[in-house]
Image: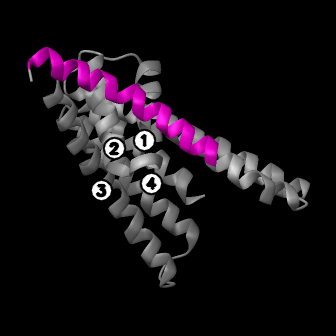
Amino acid sequence: MSGMDIKRLVRGVGPVLAVLGLLFVGGKLIQQAPKVLARAVAFGTAITLTLAILLHSFGGAVLGVAWREILGHLHVDVDRRWAVAAYAKSYLARYVLGNVFQYVGRHAIGTAAGIGLKVLIKSSFWKLGILLSTSAVFGVVYWLVAMGDIHYAGAIGVFFAVTITEIAILRHVGRPHLSRAVGFYAIYLSIGGI
């Protein structure tokens, strides 16, 4: 297989995964609609569900912007809208084939846009590292709350104090893109915690 054949194959994977994701999610909506419609949904429940959907959508956009910051750290400048759209399309792939295909789809979309595969792989490792460091703090604070060692208000304060410290350290050592990515992942985790 030649280099051009591989590029064509990679360019075709992203849109196919996005369409499969949309079909899967659409099929699930159609499958579940009768069950939902058969039950009387209280107005408050409908409002809560709508807000949860909006928060989840906002969280996806935050992840796309965080990925853009990681790419910026790797000296690749992409438009914010493109990054959010590419992240959203690849996010759909996880519903079809699992989390691994979210990365495969993002790499296919990025490669089609001219971003080198090495940069995309590095961005995935950076994403995992930043998400692990940020969520580790979140996990420790959650555990302290669950054990009754700290109140929710104190837990929120500890989480943001540690996150702000991590952001300040990254800024101090000249990593502004990574510091912003940490901030975006902290926002995402905070949304998930609601």
Residue at image x 51%, y 84%?
Answer: 148
In the rendering, at what x and y percent does residue 83 appear? 40, 25
Residue 102 picture location, percent across and down: 36, 42
Foreground residue, 112 or 84? 112
User: In this picture, is 141 found above or below 12?
Assistant: below
Front residue (pair 67, 169):
67
Residue at which label 1 appears: 93
Pointer 2 with pointer 1, Cβ within 8 A: yes
Q: Residue 151 appears in which quarter of the rendering?
A: bottom right
Q: Quadrant of the C terminus?
A: bottom right
Per the rendering, the mark at residue 101 is 2
Q: Which residue is mark 4?
A: 160
x and y, in percent, of residue 10 in the image = 25, 26
Q: Secondary structure at mark 4?
A: helix
Mark 2, Cα crowd under 10 Å, few <14 / some 14-19 / many 20+, is: some
- Compare marks 3 and 1 and give the one earlier in the sequence: 1
Q: Are marks 1 and 4 in contact (CB under 8 Å)?
A: no
Q: Amino acid at mark 3?
A: Leu
